[in-house]
Image (cartoon, rainbow, N blue to C red):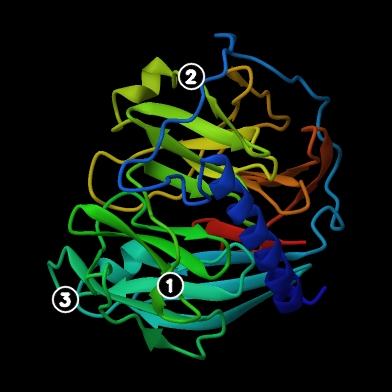
């Protein structure tokens, strides 16, 4: 598969879909103006368990035939690992510099094409936004241009969030800005006032919190939902947020928000937003992260490897990860 050609095609579809959402009163950015209209609520139940699939099959090297993109942290630089089959290569490294901004912000776009990170001095809470291709080429800084201040916050649980492969939502001085990294300018449309946003890789559906209430869009229809995280863990964190969304917007993977200002890429449960139920995920061991891929594949990562599920959460196989990547973050998978 040509990743670059596929991504461009999907971005065109996403742009057309975004226009349709705006016409319906809900924008692809999650808002329609300086104060976005709240989506229409859909009743749902309080049940906690939804799907109970069979046990996962034995290890299969063909369960993930595409490319995985990992973010690892070396002593002096972040490393971007590209894994396909049994091959693991480092595509580029990004030096940390004098502060923690790079380590806390560096991220990979949904189709593995782009990198973005913030560079700042020691002790800085904001810095300069930088983008490059995944191999490190084409590096460029994003300059000030209204409504973007030119200073991006580099602290917090998830300071940079992708909206399709070329657009990035950033935090700046208490408000949000949506940037087009291809033109290096603010993107068309309003970033809105909603919080804790997360888009599907193609940008057609998203999850967010509106006036304290979580919701997700399911094929163009906004649905409020309820989720109560495990009480035994909740006291250790500052709440939860969405970190991956299924392509139709029905399911969201949720993770804890840190009690400090450092990043967190993990997730631990899947919620069906149409029923409020959590999904029983096959496999053994504590879940570290859950990633919804563009083809409907669900990657459930544990210490022992990756359990691969289909879009109905039935097991496809398990994949053992390369040695040395146990502590890395799996940020993207391209079938």
Quarter location, residue 191: bottom left
Q: Is residue 324 visible?
A: no
Q: Is residue 136 left or right of residue 60?
A: left
Where is mark 3, residue-wise? 121
Question: In terms of depth relative to the viewer, which is nearer, 82 or 204?
Answer: 204
Query: Which comes before the other along the chain, label 1 or label 2?
Result: 1
Q: Is residue 247 left or right of residue 59?
A: left
Q: Nearer the viewer, mark 1 or mark 2?
A: 2
Where is mark 2, residue-wise? 226
Q: Residue at x 35, y 24 (%)?
A: 234
Would you call the spot at circle 1 few (<14 residues within 10 Å), some (14-19), or many (20 or more)?
many
Would you call the spot at circle 2 few (<14 residues within 10 Å), some (14-19), or many (20 or more)?
some
Q: Is residue 302 left or right of residue 40?
A: right
Where is mark 1, residue-wise? 116
Q: In the image, is residue 127 above or below residue 284?
A: below
For label 3, the SS is: loop
Question: In terms of depth relative to the viewer, which is nearer, 188 or 63?
Answer: 188
Query: Which comes before the other along the chain, label 3 or label 2?
Result: 3
The residue sitting at the left extreme is 123
For label 2, the SS is: loop
Residue 77 rendering spot, x and y as whole percentages: 38, 77
For label 1, the SS is: strand
Quadrant position of the C terminus in the picture: bottom right
């Amino acid at each position: 598969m040509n990743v670059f050609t596929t991504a461009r095609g999907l971005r065109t579809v996403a742009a057309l879909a975004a226009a349709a959402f705006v016409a319906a009163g809900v924008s692809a950015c999650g808002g329609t103006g300086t104060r976005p209209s709240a989506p229409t609520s859909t009743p749902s139940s309080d049940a906690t368990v939804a799907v109970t699939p069979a046990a996962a099959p034995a290890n299969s090297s063909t369960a993930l035939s595409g490319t995985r993109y990992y973010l690892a942290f070396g002593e002096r630089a972040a490393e971007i690992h590209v894994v396909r089959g049994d091959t693991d290569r480092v595509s580029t490294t990004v030096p940390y510099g004098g502060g923690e901004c790079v380590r806390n912000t560096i991220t990979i776009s949904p189709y593995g094409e782009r990198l973005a990170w913030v560079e700042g001095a020691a002790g800085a809470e904001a810095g300069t936004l930088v983008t490059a291709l995944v191999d490190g080429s084409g590096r460029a800084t994003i300059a000030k241009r209204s409504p973007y201040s030119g200073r991006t916050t580099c602290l917090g649980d998830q300071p940079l969030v992708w909206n399709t492969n070329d657009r990035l939502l950033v935090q700046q001085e208490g408000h949000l800005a949506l940037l087009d990294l291809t033109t290096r300018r603010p993107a068309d449309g309003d970033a809105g006032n909603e919080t804790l946003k997360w888009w599907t890789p193609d940008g057609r559906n998203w999850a967010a919190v509106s006036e304290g209430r979580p919701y997700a869009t399911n094929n163009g229809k906004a649905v409020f939902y309820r989720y109560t995280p495990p009480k035994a863990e909740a006291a250790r964190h500052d709440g939860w947020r969405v970190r991956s969304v299924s392509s139709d917007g029905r399911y969201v993977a949720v993770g804890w928000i840190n009690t400090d200002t450092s990043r967190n890429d993990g997730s631990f449960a899947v919620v069906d937003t149409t029923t409020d139920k959590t999904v029983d995920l096959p496999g053994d061991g504590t879940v570290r992260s859950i990633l919804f891929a563009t083809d409907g594949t669900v990657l459930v990562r544990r210490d022992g490897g990756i359990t691969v599920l289909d879009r109905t959460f039935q097991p496809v196989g398990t994949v053992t990860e390369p040695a040395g990547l146990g502590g890395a973050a799996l940020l993207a998978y391209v079938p």
